[in-house]
Amino acid sequence: MNIEQQIKELREELRAYNYQYYVLDNATVSDFEFDQKLKELQQLEDAHPEYFDANSPTQRVGGEITKNFETVKHNFRMYSLDNSYSKEDLEDWETRVKKMVDGDVNYACELKYDGASMSLTYEKGVLVRAVTRGDGFQGDNVTANVKTIKSVPLQLKGDYPELFEIRGEIVLPFDGFNAMNEERIAAGEEPYRNPRNTASGSLKLQDSAEVAKRPLDCLLYSLVANKLPVATQMEGLKKASDWGFKVPPVAKLASSIEEVLEFVNYWDKHRHELPYETDGVVVKVNSLQQQEELGYTSKSPRWAMAYKFKAEQVSTVLEEITYQVGRTGAITPVANLQPVELAGTTVKRASLHNADQIEKLDIRERDTVYVEKGGEIIPKIIGVNLEERPEDSQPTKYISQCPDCHTALVRTEGDAKHYCPNEEGCSTQIIGRIQHFISRKAMDIEGLGGETVALLVNEGVIKNYADLYALTVEDILPLERMAQKSAENLVEGVSKSKEIPFERVLFALGIRFVGETVAKKLAKHFKSIDALMEASFEQLIAVDEIGDRIAESVLAFFKIETQDLFSEIKQGETHREVVERLRAYGVQLAISEEELAGQTDTLAGSTFVVSGVFAKVSRTELKKLIEDNGGKVSGSISKKTSYVVAGDKMGPSKRTKAEELGVVIITEDDFLAMIAK
Ligand code: AMP
Ligand code: ZN
């Protein structure tokens, strides 16, 4: 089999796995096998760029950067939908419809997915364009980002038309949304509020590789073309599904408004069982012929109607407002409610966000409050029933002291939250930081759980995470419910964590805004904790994707504290001292020799674009060489490009662009000579 054939077959195979997994939710190979095949394809493509295909499964990982999204006009306008809220609204609509068309009318009932609307254009079965709804007439070209969404087919199968558009909704399923939030919380950041805004925000990220990491999904519901190979909406859904699109199978044909209402009532009850958010039902006249007769008003089709589910709302008594302290010291007020059923779950607590929110709604203890579960995961209080307010009610006084250590809280300009500044002495913060340190994605310490950490801190056995490494079995045994075996496991687990690589140690330290990804970037760039601790603000922000906020947070964390002459003996250890102790215990504070070998900063400050086929190294190797030597690899030529490394068969348009912008073009040998120095 020749190479071209081999590449083609691998692509087909991977496409089929992707389809099974992301469109049909049905895994047909192990992740390992999939990754192996993908790697194999990547290597072949790297070695043979002449077979490059923008729609290859390898292109899903993204990497293209879009600074400004191009505005493009929709070929077919993206209309809004009229809303209805009751049986009567739907019956009125039916009357209007029946006046305008002849014959029986059937209705396609679908769910209204709550995400970001999207229009995809396919030419000869290949995705060529993805555009946001915008104002309905024109939207943003977000093709590079949408290509990374695994359930969007890049290549269709079957009897698709030459040219057509398909519309759908980009959603972020609850599972993925929650996982993203867990990661944010781990980095000491505010969690995202709701899946819909997070989904539409994701589409406008500049780095498509970031979008690729987000577990977005695309649900399709409508074909658009001058001439469609179907006669009804339901047939359209079936065809779209046959061609490889993800079309939720819930759609149902109804022959009367009674049947439509049955569908509405069923899903009003059961929508919480779905993996993603829905906010209603969309009813469409099924016959496309009738749709055409009905046409459009100035803003919406006359042949469709949205039926909005009522945002679920209940009223209950707010028993008490309590305050939580996070590991960064941030205070979150929590409403403790009289338990109440809402959207299929029992709700006992609701977030109050911050002091401003409480003041704005004048929320008080013992008030009867309205609780709503909308797009948000955590229910929120949307108002107070003033008629039920007890006569002796007093306005809520926000706490001024930490509920744990009683230190006066502080609030900085522009931050809605209050903080407990007593980092060293506030046990809730201390426990939170150590719990973060031992967590799975950080030091992953086996044999030690969150409750034991709390116990160790409260019993005064440890004060910070460095103390974990000095623990002995004898220290632990006296604790409640600690047997010999579990004490031994704990000590062993702690000891094993000395092998955890530097990038994860850096994440474990719990520097605010330094999540997993940022920790990786910093570790790769600075290579050791020493270099990072000495870095200036300018050096920090020079690192790719490190902004002011992160740089300031790193500086603050490692600040050298000058001893105040008049202060009493210093309370706790500084972060630098803690780091020194971790070093003494043997924790990894630099990237390993192996990783280090071959890494230089010869190319620091230079950005490279790689194009064409190379004789001595593969494209992947070339890119790795650039990065290992401190350079940056970019996908497209711009004014910021320092060099284009040109191989055989470099694209002519790239060459022209490089010449126009005056970017230096070098050969493979020039490049190898550059790093040999
Ligand atoms: P609205 O924004 O309230 O006018 O509602 C119109 C939007 O509903 C469309 O732009 C679509 O993005 C969205 N939508 C969600 N699910 C569907 C569906 N099954 N059929 C049509 N539109 C839908
Ligand atoms: Zn405190």
Image: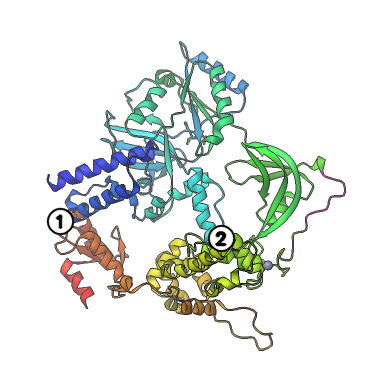
The outermost residue toward the top is: 103
Marks 1 and 2 sit apart, C-alpha to C-alpha, by 57 Å
The outermost residue toward the bottom is: 565
| Total labels drawn | 2
Query: Which residue is at the front of the view, 659 or 125?
Result: 125
Query: Which residue is at the front of the view, 533 or 456?
Result: 456
Q: Is residue 391 magenta?
A: yes
Magenta stretch bounds: 389-397
Q: Is residue 284 magenta?
A: no
| Residue 449 image label | 2
Query: Which residue is at the front of the view, 450 or 215?
Result: 450
The outermost residue toward the right is: 392
Q: Quadrant of the C terminus?
A: bottom left
Q: Is mark 2 within 8 Å of ligand 2?
A: no
| Residue 649 image label | 1
Quadrant of the rendered image containing residue 30: top left
Residue 285, can we see it? yes
Determine whether 632 is above or below 127 in the image: below
Q: Is residue 209 left or right of residue 603?
A: right
Could you tell me residue 643's position as x and y percent? Answer: 25, 67
Specify few, some or many for label 1: CA neighbours under 10 Å numbering under 14, 14-19, or 20 or more: few
